Image: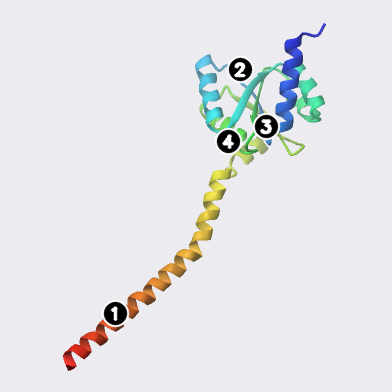
Amino acid sequence: MVRPEKIAEVELLTEKLRMSEGLVLADFTGLNVAEISEFRSRCREKGVEFRVVKNRLARRAAAEAECQEIETFLQGPTGIAFGLESAVEPAKVVIDFAKDHEQMVVKGGYLDGKLLDSAEVEALSKIPGREELLSMLMRTMQGPTTGVVGCLSGVMRNLVGVLDAVAKEKAEAA
C-alpha cells in the first residue's frame, strides 16, 4: 500500500528535478549533524537546496521527470544538491565542502540531460558563477569608456594649460 507521505515526496522530488538547472549527487556518510547543518547553510547562501533522498523514491521521481540516467548514482546513502537558480552553484558548494570534509563524496551530477562523473562535477565547479561573469562583463565594457574619458580629460587639461600660457603671455606683453 502506498502512503501519502511517499507520494508527496516523489511529487516534490519530481518537481525539483524538473526545475533544477543542474544537480549534484553525493554520499554524506560519516558527517555529523553539525557538519550537515553547516553544509545546508552554505547551500542556502548560494541558492542551492540539499535533500537527503530515499533511493527508491528518487528512482520513481527520476522516471517521472524523465531523467532516469541519474539512477546509476542512486546507491547507498544519497543526498542531492539542486541548483534551482544556477547550474554551477551546486557543484561549487559540494566540491568546496568536500575539500574540507573528506566524508562528503561526490557521486556525480546531471546537467542538460547529461550525466557528469565526479571529475566533470569538479571541472564544472571551477566555472565562474553568474555574478562573477556579470562583473567580468561590466569590467570589459567599462574599459573602453574609461579610456575615452581619460583621453578627453587629458585633452581638456592640455587645452587649459595652453589657454593659461596664452593669458600669461598677454599679461606680460601688456
Q: Disc 1 on helix, strand or loop?
A: helix
Cα distance between the residues tagged 2 and 4: 20 Å
Q: Earlier in the sequence, mark 1 or mark 4?
A: 4
Query: How many numbered marks have been drawn onto this rendered protein structure?
Result: 4
Cα distance between the residues tagged 1 and 4: 54 Å
Q: Amino acid at mark 4?
A: Lys
Q: Earlier in the sequence, mark 3 or mark 4?
A: 3
Cα distance between the residues tagged 3 and 4: 11 Å
Cα distance between the residues tagged 3 and 1: 62 Å
Q: Quadrant of residue 113?
A: top right
Q: Amino acid at mark 1?
A: Gly
Task: Write down the residue under mark 2.
Answer: 29
Q: Amino acid at mark 2?
A: Thr
Which residue corresponds to the image point at 78% horizontal and 25% vertical from the top-left?
62
For the N terminus, give its image quadrant.
Answer: top right
Task: Write down the residue under mark 3.
Answer: 23
Which residue corresponds to the image point at 77% horizontal and 15% vertical from the top-left?
7
Task: Write down the residue under mark 1.
Answer: 161
Cα distance between the residues tagged 3 and 2: 19 Å
> In x, y percent, where is residue 19?
71, 32
Q: Earlier in the sequence, mark 2 or mark 1?
A: 2
Circle 2/circle 1 CB separation < 8 Å: no
Mark in front: 1 vs 4: 1
User: Which class describes the residues within 10 Å of circle 2: few (<14), some (14-19), or many (20+)?
Assistant: few
Mark in front: 3 vs 1: 1
Q: Is residue 55 visible?
A: no
Q: Amino acid at mark 3?
A: Leu
Task: Write down the residue under mark 4.
Answer: 92
Viewer-side residue, 110 vs 6: 6
